[in-house]
Amino acid sequence: MKGVESTFFSNSKYNRRNILIMNNDDFDRFKGSQDYVASEALRNAVNVSIALAKPLLVRGEPGTGKTLLAHSIAKGLGKKLIIWNIKSTTKAQEGLYVYDTVQRLNDSRFGGKEVSDIRQYIKLGKLGQSFTSKEQLVLLIDEIDKADLEFPNDLLNELDEMSFYIPETNETFKAIHRPIVIITSNAEKELPDAFLRRCVFHYIEFPDPELMEEIVHVHFPNLKDDLLKEALRTFYSLREIDQFRKKPSTSELIDWVQVLVASSTSPEIISKEIPFTSTLIKKEADHSFFSNLYMRRKQASRVSGYD
Ligand SMILES: Nc1ncnc2c1ncn2[C@@H]1O[C@H](COP(=O)(O)OP(=O)(O)O)[C@@H](O)[C@H]1O
Ligand SMILES: [Mg+2]
């Protein structure tokens, strides 16, 4: 453990109780990247997770930049990224390794191949690859809440020890460099306590308009200020509609701004018509609710002579 950490924190020292004392540069490793805006709290959480060599569990509503965070960490620290996309059918074991018995059987029956070396039929999964890598890398376990509840529990040991045993070959793999592990989860499902205990946790709040301005700016550095202001004003007023089943998120805003720019829409048109709502509103019920509301507002403004 000590050896592994000292390669992370080259200038740091251990005190008499063998606790790592980091100098500030070592702790403050993740500073964000050019294409990703990370709040101070988020940067801090990333650095705590790296310092403790514990996985960072990031939660937040869809579109708040959880997946992109892992890309940004990899880019910012100059490390390779391995992505493990979790599906409802994903099992923890697949992340470690799969023993391809079917291939072995085929080879022994029809291939005329030497099949006694089982190692050639062991295919490492994403977790296995990240443990056996010669250099430290970033591992993203994306949308862990999609799998069943057993999934995080089944990973506890491996994430703690960063090692696993393959009985078929009687081999144990232990991470030479503990990967930087980022785990994302949408805010819906509760994860087991035992799993939470092993992670550093951060909830990405939906960005306030100021932070969102920075985020949009990263994607559209030359965006005119009045267009940005009007787009954000409209976007946040849409998010205030409580009846919406799915409020538009950052990714929808980025798409919308892209269309606004491509179509040279003026700020006046945005405030008057709210064009291209199909990029912002994704549910049928929300669409009809919005259309009704919009029509009513338009009629009211006509009656009062504003239109
Ligand atoms: N902090 C951010 N900085 C830059 N772009 C962001 C940020 N947050 C969200 N985005 C934009 O929103 C999109 C969706 O982000 P993503 O990471 O896929 O969200 P999540 O994984 O939380 O659903 C990104 O592709 C990016 O365009
Ligand atoms: Mg995601």
Image (tube, grey):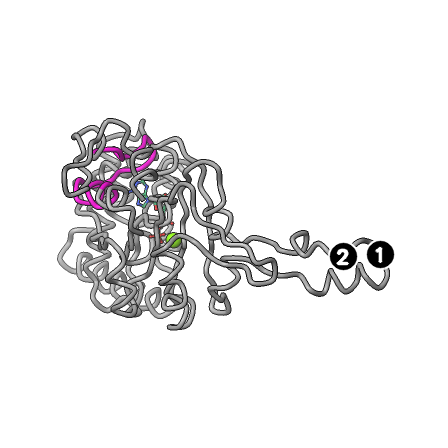
Q: Residue 124 carries which label?
A: none
Query: Disc 2 designates what residue?
Result: 115
- What residue is rendered at 23% in x and 49% in y? 234
Foreground: 270 or 46? 46
Q: Do the residues labelled 1 and 2 touch (CB within 8 Å)?
A: yes
Callout 2 amino acid: Val
Foreground: 185 or 175? 175
- What residue is rendered at 80% in x and 53% in y? 114
Q: Residue 111 carries which label?
A: 1
> Where 196 sits versus 181, above or below?
below
The overriding secondary structure of the stretch rendered in magenta is: loop
Foreground: 192 or 268? 192
- Region of the chain picked out in magenta, as a range: 28-47
- Tell us which disc is closer to us: 1 or 2: 2
Foreground: 291 or 214? 214
x and y percentages locating residue 68 in the rendered image:
36, 44
Where disc 2 sits, the SS reads: loop
Q: Is residue 297 visible?
A: yes
Callout 1 amino acid: Gly
Q: In this view, does 89 lie to the left or right of 228?
A: right
Total numbered labels: 2
> Where 8 sits versus 246, above or below?
above
Q: How far apart are marks 1 and 2 (CA)?
A: 10 Å
- What residue is rendered at 17% in x and 30% in y? 23
x and y percentages locating residue 288 in the rendered image:
34, 68
- What residue is rendered at 25% in x and 43% in y? 46
